Image (tube, rainbow, N blue to C red):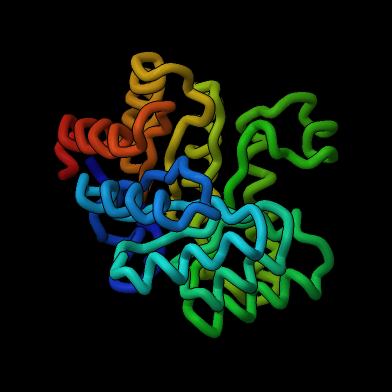
């Protein structure tokens, strides 16, 4: 298969996009305030072959856990999952995370976005834009009437444009849906419109068997078309099972 040519984004010593191998991601399901539990799960994920670990950062206090993980020898790239508070993003950047997941349009004024961009640029930290069916802006939903593939893609591009206006291009884009066809088409649209690396996944995929089937179809279809630079197979089980499922999908496609 001919792989879509995307720009390279660096997470420490790991590259997403360009000619780099497709990376496998997962996400901890521990309480981030519980540093010990989060450490143990992150270590287990790394040992299972996970290459990037995303950890939710619900408040500034939780960011301390990222520091603790680094101090205890966790070297795998860590992504801080942030939704609305720019102060958490600033704290995460200072704590040495490898990437920040945040939507620029959701964190307030342009000045707040600029602060986050400056903090990330100074430390060469990429920003992942994450859009899903449940996070679309009101005006986008009103325009399309539903969380369609076109709506998801437009939302993602709008968020990317905010960063571009601040001359920030160290960006990864993710658009997800629980509807496999919508997820596939949204990523196809983005693959045509931008060269940013794309993170693939099906959100709210359901129980284990159904989730693996949906993810295999959605993620697998796009990878077979040469679309996608990094993947997560979302399951409700132990996150290490996500890694195993991702490895199987990549293996079947001859991408390992």
Residue at point 37%, 34% (across, down): 233
Query: Compared with residue 51, is residue 69 higher up or lower down, i.e. above or below?
Result: below
- Residue 161: image quadrant is bottom right
Q: Using the image as rendered, state which of residue 43 and residue 103 is in the foreground.
A: 43
Measured as percent of width and height from the top left, residue 63 is found at 56, 65
Q: Using the image as rendered, state which of residue 9 and residue 36 is in the foreground.
A: 36
Query: Compared with residue 43, is residue 142 higher up or lower down, i.e. above or below?
Result: above
Q: Is residue 248 visible?
A: yes
Please identify the quadrant where the C terminus is shown.
Answer: top left
Query: Compared with residue 163, is residue 256 higher up or lower down, i.e. above or below?
Result: above
Residue at point 64%, 38% (across, down): 152
Measured as percent of width and height from the top left, residue 99 is found at 48, 64
Measured as percent of width and height from the top left, residue 213 is found at 35, 18
Query: Compared with residue 187, is residue 103 higher up or lower down, i.e. above or below?
Result: below
Residue at point 56%, 56% (across, down): 101
Query: In the image, is 38 to the left or to the right of 255?
Result: right
Q: Is residue 222 visible?
A: no
Residue at point 61%, 37% (across, down): 132
Q: How many marks?
A: 0
Q: Using the image as rendered, state which of residue 98 and residue 218 is in the foreground.
A: 98
Q: Residue furthest bottom?
A: 122
Measured as percent of width and height from the top left, residue 231 is found at 37, 43
Please identify the quadrant where the N terminus is shown.
Answer: top left
Query: In the image, is 128 to the left or to the right of 18?
Result: right
Query: In the image, is 65 to the left or to the right of 76?
Result: right
């Amino acid at each position: 298969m001919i792989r879509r040519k995307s720009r390279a984004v660096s997470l420490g010593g790991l590259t997403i996009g360009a000619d780099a191998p497709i990376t496998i991601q997962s996400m901890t399901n521990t309480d981030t305030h519980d540093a010990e539990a989060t450490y143990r799960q992150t270590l287990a994920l790394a040992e299972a072959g996970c290459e990037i670990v995303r950890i939710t950062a619900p408040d500034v206090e939780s960011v301390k856990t990222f520091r603790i993980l680094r101090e205890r020898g966790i070297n795998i790239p860590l992504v801080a999952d942030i939704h609305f508070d720019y102060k958490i993003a600033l704290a995460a950047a200072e704590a040495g995370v490898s990437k920040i997941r945040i939507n620029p349009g959701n964190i307030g004024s342009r000045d707040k976005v600029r602060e986050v961009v400056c903090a990330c640029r100074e430390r060469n930290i990429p920003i992942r834009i994450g859009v899903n069916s449940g996070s679309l802006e009101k005006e986008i939903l009103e325009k399309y009437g539903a969380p369609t593939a076109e709506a998801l893609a437009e939302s993602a591009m709008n968020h990317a444009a905010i960063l571009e206006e601040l001359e920030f291009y160290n960006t990864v884009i993710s658009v997800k849906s629980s509807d496999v066809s919508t997820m596939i088409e949204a990523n196809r649209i983005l693959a045509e419109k931008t060269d940013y690396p794309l993170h693939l996944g099906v959100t709210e995929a359901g129980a284990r068997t159904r989730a693996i089937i949906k993810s295999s179809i959605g993620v697998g279809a796009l990878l077979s078309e040469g679309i996608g630079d990094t993947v997560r197979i979302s399951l409700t089980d132990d996150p290490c099972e996500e890694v195993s499922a991702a490895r199987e999908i990549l293996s079947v496609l001859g991408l390992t």
